[in-house]
Image (cartoon, grey):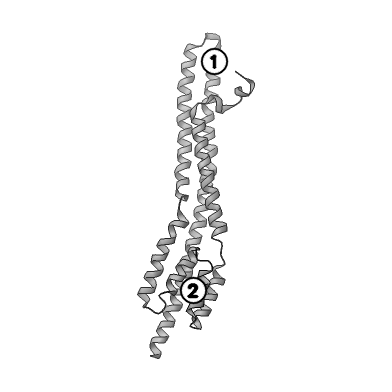
Amino acid sequence: MGFLEQFNPFSRSGIWMFLILMVSVYIVTIVVERAYVLWFRFKIDANQILSRIISFVDSNNYSRAIEVCNARQNHPLCVVLKSGLLKANRSDVEIRRAMEQATLKVSPEIQKRVPYLATLANVATLLGLLGTIFGLIMAFEGVEMASAAKKQEVLARGISLAMNTTAFGLIVAIPTTIAHAVLSSRQNALLDLIEDSALTLFNHLSAKNRVGTMKH
């Protein structure tokens, strides 16, 4: 046994450490991608966007209001607000339905893959425990074949190596659980922002339509 191999848990803990490592790589990929999308790609000044849209709506310039949305046409908030503007002269029911349908359409883009993190954290923990169980089985089998003088040494080394998989599983699972909580909080905040902005625009369009109806 080489010197480096002796202190490398991956080389002696079987396939379990590598399975957990593969899970951790997938986790990192999800966290990085979702963090980029939720904090950078979907970053927007909702108050400014909404203020400009309402200003154009008040002046009956709906085409300019839609242009504001088109400037960020791939952002979920603008998709939802634009759906309401396209139905601006219709009934309240039609406006609300259009915005609700748009919200349902963009929600998966905000929420996708984040729920996987909770499952992957559990998988990493369970793989660690399973690796430990198999490691202990192998350790006790090794004790049976070892000489009397080396039984204790073989058992101690086997248990130590078996515990590596549990430790590694927890090392992966704990940050993953934290990342899941943080990303879930961010996506919920974004969904709340979309809902609040959509409601504000809906109320404004509804009030404007009522005023127009009364004038006629």
**Dot 2: what SS?**
helix
Q: Residue at x 51, y 50 (%)?
A: 181
Q: Which of these two is toward me, 71 or 112? A: 71
Q: CA distance from mark 2 to mark 1?
A: 76 Å
Q: Residue at x 44, y 61 (%)?
A: 106
Q: Residue furthest bottom?
A: 216
Instruction: Return the residue at label 2.
Output: 66
Q: Which of these two is toward me, 28 or 149? A: 28
Q: Closer to us: mark 2 or mark 1?
A: 2
Instruction: Return the residue at label 1.
Output: 152
Q: Residue 12 lies in what quarter of the image?
A: top right
Residue 49 rendering spot, x and y as whole percentages: 54, 71
**Dot 1: what SS?**
helix
The correct choice, above or below, for 109 with respect to 197 in the image is above
Q: Tell me which numbered mark, 2 or 1, is placed earlier along the sequence.
A: 2
Amino acid type at mark 2: Ile
Amino acid type at mark 1: Gln
